[in-house]
Image (cartoon, grey):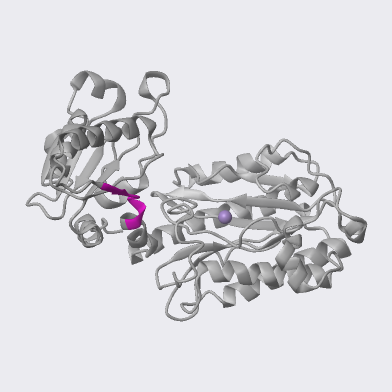
Amino acid sequence: MNKPDFSQRRKKLYTAVKEGVLLLIGTPEPTGLGGAGKFYQNRDLLYYTGFPEPSAAALFKPGSGKPFTLFVQPRDPAAETWTGKRFGVEGAVEVFGADQAFPTDQWPEKLYEALVNEKTLYYRWGEYEAADAVVLQVLQRLRREQRADKNPIRVVDSGEATFPIRLIKEPGEVELIRQSAAIADKAIRRIFAETKPGMMEYQVEAMVEETYRFNGADGPSFPTIIAAGEHATCMHYAENSGHIKPGDFLLVDTGCLYAGYACDVTRTFLPGGGKPTAQQKTIWDAVKAIQDAMLSKCRTDISLCELNQLCQRVTAQKLIELGFLKESLDTVLEKNLHKYYFPHRLGHWLGLDVHDVGSWGMEDPSLKLAPGMALTIEPGIYIPADAPPEAATFRGIGVRLEEDVVITSGNPDILTKGIPYAP
Ligand SMILES: [Mn+2]
């Protein structure tokens, strides 16, 4: 894999920021014993700079002669003995291409200087409390010192500038998600081969996560969900402490992080490869049919928002056909009655984070899918143990199926399509 072209990414960013100033704060030093612990760099900072160390910050001012300033922890032989070698201020310039670099504690002063004659600050509130307080102090100082004829500074969420670019994956990024999914493929095949009724959910979790690390992934991209029987009707069941009883469906929702990129796949199957009951088969087939219908819609003429609305409609229709809901389709959708059996959305963006760029753009019907966008498609039907009488014989069955998809100008590229559905 070629190294990403960070300067190309920054060029796109400068076009988005125009005349403003953009401040990105990196993830602080891990707070574990002696600064030990896994370090997960802020995804925006990582994407636009590649800088891998804790307690960094980046300031972008496209209108200036030095648009890219990095703030990093300075070299410190004593600290480096414990937490590893640092690039330092020199490395920030030489290795990461910053136009200038300073020790981290100087970003408040440099932010102040950068904002003196600017009108717009791109900054994301609510990510790091300590940084929020410092940005506020800088703004207060500017307001105190500004004369009445100067425009106030408006603060815009930095995601407005950084997210639309990150949403379109470069070919190299798509390959990393594909490799991430290939490791999840190994994990799923392994648990298909080795999971038997009578085992504990956490034993399956252990197999999955061992497979991730053994194959070079950083680890799971989110807490692994191993849900036997009615545990599957709890959406984010992550206790994984239950017993897998004979005849239970096992829902496995898992993904790994490989070279910084997440995958996310779900399979629901009978451990040991037995024959499902008629009710289990009915629900599984219904979810698979919804899944196939949704995958065929993953094209550039629709938004994720519209795709989700369509999935709500198709699922509601299925639930009516199954006899779980007695009202008309319009009434069901209007009153959200189907949410009892399908409480979540169709899917989410995928990339450096398993929920890449958060929920940005997911509710925007005008944001059509475009080549390079990566997302998950994960319909499901869940019948709680206390479901109403019309679903009585289906109680405790929960099925979800999830694929990772990259949009192209034609048919979607389904990265997880090689992962089997059953042992
Ligand atoms: Mn997912």
Quarter-of-image position of residue 266:
bottom right
Q: In the image, ligand 1 is in what quadrant?
A: bottom right
Q: Magenta residues, as a range?
A: 154-160
Q: Position of residue 355 (x, y in %)?
A: 49, 52
Residue 310 horizontal side relative to residue 38, left or right: right
Q: Residue at x 38, y 28 (%)?
A: 30
Res 286 visible: no
Q: Residue furthest front?
A: 148
Q: Position of residue 374 (x, y in %)?
A: 46, 64
The verdict on residue 157 being magenta is: yes
Is the C terminus in the top left, top right, bottom left or bottom right quadrant?
Answer: bottom right
**Placement of 299 over or under 53, stated as above or below:** below
Q: Residue at x 88, y 59 (%)?
A: 391
Q: Residue at x 82, y 58 (%)?
A: 274
Q: Residue furthest bottom?
A: 410
Q: Nearer the viewer, residue 240 or 148?
A: 148
Q: Residue at x 82, y 73 (%)?
A: 321
Is the N terminus in the top left, top right, bottom left or bottom right quadrant?
Answer: bottom left
Res 143 visible: yes
